[in-house]
Image: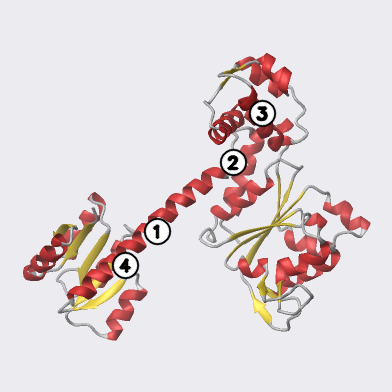
């Protein structure tokens, strides 16, 4: 049941609103002043708040500014002295809506219902974000991982472009997602492009979009990944495999913060943070003429190296614990236990496929073994 707080210095107004909203099935709390209401925000969880403008000691706008530092609850401002200027000021400072007194009953109920729907969506989004964040959580406490995590924490809040280096399967995408989640852009999109998986003749259309009729199969206008990532993060995975023609256009986009769709003439402004990753030695690729040196310097303000699994063997028990739960849940099987000797045997492996290989091995053992996974099981199936 939704809880609603009514703040008004007129007892008659509070009683009237209390009765109406209670009849609609809401749980109601009252405060005779904004000063009285502030402590209630700390002690109670409200789903919506009605607040009068004209009150002694602290008016509604002052309450709004203070409350926004304490809660995300939608606040509906009410006033018998309403003007457009007051309404605009209230909305600018974070009010959900502004209603004039005497209030229209239907308007009040519809506004409240909409505010509650919005609050519900915000809360559901937060829960989903937590689920997504856990899905891409970086596991490990080894010195190499501590150093990487420390670097992520320092770099993420900035707009610095980052080049992530590492072997296949080390978790370069996880680093990119952590940079996004811990940045001010985390409410914006995270768009991933696998440069190695897109044919060279299509990469420009993928990144920059195209106009209708730009080429035979361009039957309608399409936005590219730079546009889709506006106000967010664009992750260019395996950038070392990008064609030289596409590299030139990416360089221009990074220099000017503008792109032009394939077959188009209009320049489109974009605000994108680019994070790139590769398993190649770009210095070697530059020497071979396969990668532009000027682009390399544009994307590598910060360089992060993701350690291979053989350099962080102490993290294997933690990684196993993470993967075994996920694998068992996906396969619909009970969560097995690894013996200490089984874990030690896994530490002896070469792990040329790094984290991805370990995850596949754990999944295989969950499927093929019993409730306890032994050293013999590891030797048999790995």
Question: Residue 32, can we see it?
Answer: no
Do labels 4 and 1 touch, CB within 8 Å? no
**From what the image shows, is residue 63 above or below residue 330?**
below
Q: Toward the viewer: 179 or 150?
A: 179
Image position of 40 (left or right of 227): left
Q: Distance between the Cα atoms at labels 1 and 2?
A: 26 Å
Do labels 1 and 2 touch, CB within 8 Å? no
Q: Distance between the Cα atoms at labels 3 and 1?
A: 39 Å
Tell me the number on the disc at residue 114: 4
Q: Earlier in the sequence, mark 3 or mark 4?
A: 4
Residue bearing mark 1: 122
Is disc 3 surrounded by few (<14), some (14 to 19) or many (20+) residues within 10 Å? some
Tell us which disc is closer to us: 3 or 4: 3
Q: Earlier in the sequence, mark 2 or mark 3?
A: 2
Q: Residue furthest left?
A: 12
Label 2: which secondary element: loop
Image position of 333 (left or right of 356): left
Q: Toward the viewer: 160 or 165?
A: 165
Q: Distance between the Cα atoms at labels 4 and 1?
A: 12 Å
Q: Earlier in the sequence, mark 3 or mark 1?
A: 1
Tell us which disc is closer to us: 2 or 4: 4
Residue bearing mark 2: 138
Q: Distance between the Cα atoms at labels 2 and 4?
A: 38 Å
Label 1: which secondary element: helix
Q: Distance between the Cα atoms at labels 2 and 3?
A: 22 Å
Question: Residue 150, can we see it?
Answer: yes
């Amino acid at each position: 049941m939704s809880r609603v707080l009514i703040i008004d210095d007129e007892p008659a107004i509070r009683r009237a609103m209390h009765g109406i909203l209670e009849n609609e099935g809401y749980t109601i709390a009252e405060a005779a002043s904004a000063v009285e209401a502030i402590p209630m925000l700390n002690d109670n969880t409200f789903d919506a708040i009605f607040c009068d403008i004209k009150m002694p000691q602290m008016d509604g706008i002052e309450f709004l500014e203070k409350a926004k530092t304490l809660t995300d609850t939608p606040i509906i401002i009410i006033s018998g002295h309403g003007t457009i200027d007051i309404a605009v000021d209230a909305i600018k400072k974070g009010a959900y809506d502004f209603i004039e007194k005497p209030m229209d009953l239907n308007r009040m109920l519809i506004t409240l219902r909409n505010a509650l729907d919005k609050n519900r969506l915000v809360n559901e989004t937060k829960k989903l974000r937590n689920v997504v964040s856990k899905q891409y959580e970086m596991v490990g406490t080894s010195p190499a991982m501590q150093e990487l995590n420390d670097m992520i924490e320092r770099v993420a809040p900035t707009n610095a472009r980052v080049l992530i280096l590492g072997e296949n399967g080390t978790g370069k995408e996880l680093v990119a997602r952590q940079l996004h989640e811990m940045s001010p852009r985390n409410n914006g999109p995270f768009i991933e492009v696998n440069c190695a998986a897109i044919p060279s003749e299509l990469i420009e259309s993928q990144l920059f979009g195209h106009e209708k009729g730009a080429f035979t199969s361009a039957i309608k206008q399409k936005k590219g990944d730079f546009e889709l990532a506006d106000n967010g993060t664009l992750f260019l995975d395996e950038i070392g495999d990008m064609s030289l023609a596409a590299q030139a256009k990416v360089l221009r986009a990074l220099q000017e913060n503008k792109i032009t769709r394939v077959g188009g003439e209009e320049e489109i402004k974009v605000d994108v943070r680019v994070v790139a990753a590769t398993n190649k030695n770009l210095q070697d690729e530059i020497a071979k003429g396969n990668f532009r040196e000027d682009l390399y310097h544009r994307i590598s303000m910060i360089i992060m190296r993701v350690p291979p699994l053989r350099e962080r063997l102490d993290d294997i028990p933690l990684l196993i614990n993470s993967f075994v739960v996920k694998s068992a849940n996906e396969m619909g099987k009970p969560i097995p236990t690894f013996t200490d000797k089984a874990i030690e045997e896994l530490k002896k492996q070469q792990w040329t496929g790094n984290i991805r290989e370990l995850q596949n091995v754990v999944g295989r053992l969950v499927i093929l073994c019993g409730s306890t996974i032994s050293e013999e099981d590891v030797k048999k199936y790995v």
